[in-house]
Image (tube, grey):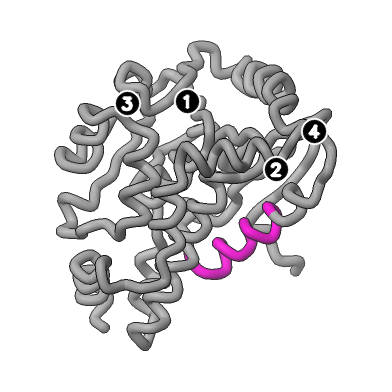
Amino acid sequence: MEKKENVILQKKDNVYYLALNRAKANNFNVEFIRDINAKLDVVEKDVDICALVTSSNIQRFFSTGLDAKFISSTTHPEDLKNFLLEFNQLIGRVLIFPIPTIAILNGLTIAGGLMFAMAHDYRFMPNNNDWICLNEVDMGFALLPGMNAVVQCKTAPHAYRELFLAGRRIIAKDAFELGIIDFLIEDQTKMRDQVHEFANKIAEKSRFKENFQALKMEAYGHAYKKANNTKFGDNKAGLERIMSLASL
């Protein structure tokens, strides 16, 4: 039987569509991270004008974050450190990707899934009962600096408080009012068309990709450097808590 692709990449007009397709909830393990990076490699090599739209193919979930089963299966602290570093580097890469990026939060978006979505330039969400959440505060996790910085550079202080310190489950309408998402879609049957129209339009901003990426680096350079930090000295609290839950 042919193995199902964890990540599906297609192109329509000037828009690349990256669909997260890992059952059951698009949890991030090493293989999934590397599959996403491989698709991003394809997009990044395209010299034409383009934009990237990320969404989920899994019903009810955009992503629920890091794969706890994978974490608990790691047998050495260095394996866990390397996994966390790869995830941090992935969200750092998306943060300064050289073309416009859009995330469609078409399902529950939790913890690392929300961090990944926040790394995109724009976020769309249907106005339904789905919610977003950073639940680390309730789990006793102190986030690694890269994870924290990527979300913090995209949120106002009051929104940051609701996400990180309150761990609040935020429905689409409230996420829009807090500025966490940029577009609230009332008619879900038209969402794909609206996103495609918007993505095609902003794809023009990738005409000068090196400059576009440089501008992102100016805006988010601090967070990008945090996400690519290979030393875990200042990440000790969060890392030790994760390791303790993984029984390492």
Q: CA distance from mark 3 to mark 1?
A: 10 Å
Residue in view at x 22 percent, y 71 percent: 236
Image location of residue 127, percent across then percent down: 43, 18
Q: CA distance from mark 2 to mark 3?
A: 36 Å
Q: Amino acid at mark 1?
A: Met
Label 4 belongs to which residue? 49
Secondary element under disc 4, as helix, strand or loop, is loop
Q: Amino acid at mark 2?
A: Glu
Q: CA distance from mark 3 to mark 4?
A: 34 Å
Q: Quadrant of the C terminus?
A: bottom left
Q: CA distance from mark 4 to mark 1?
A: 25 Å
Q: Amino acid at mark 4?
A: Ile
Image location of residue 232, percent across then percent down: 32, 72
First-in-chain label (2 vs 1): 1
Label 3 belongs to which residue? 171
Q: Nearer the viewer, mark 2 or mark 4?
A: 2
Label 1 belongs to which residue? 125
Neighbours of disc 3 within 10 Å: few (<14), some (14-19), many (20+): some
Q: Amino acid at mark 3?
A: Ile
Residue in view at x 46 percent, y 52 percent: 224
Neighbours of disc 1 within 10 Å: few (<14), some (14-19), many (20+): many
Label 2 belongs to which residue? 210
Q: Nearer the viewer, mark 2 or mark 3?
A: 2
Region in magenta: 29-40
Query: Observer-nearest residue: 102 or 127?
Result: 102
Q: Nearer the viewer, mark 4 or mark 1?
A: 4
Secondary element under disc 3, as helix, strand or loop, is strand
Q: Is residue 61 visible?
A: no
First-in-chain label (2 vs 3): 3
Secondary element under disc 1, as helix, strand or loop, is strand
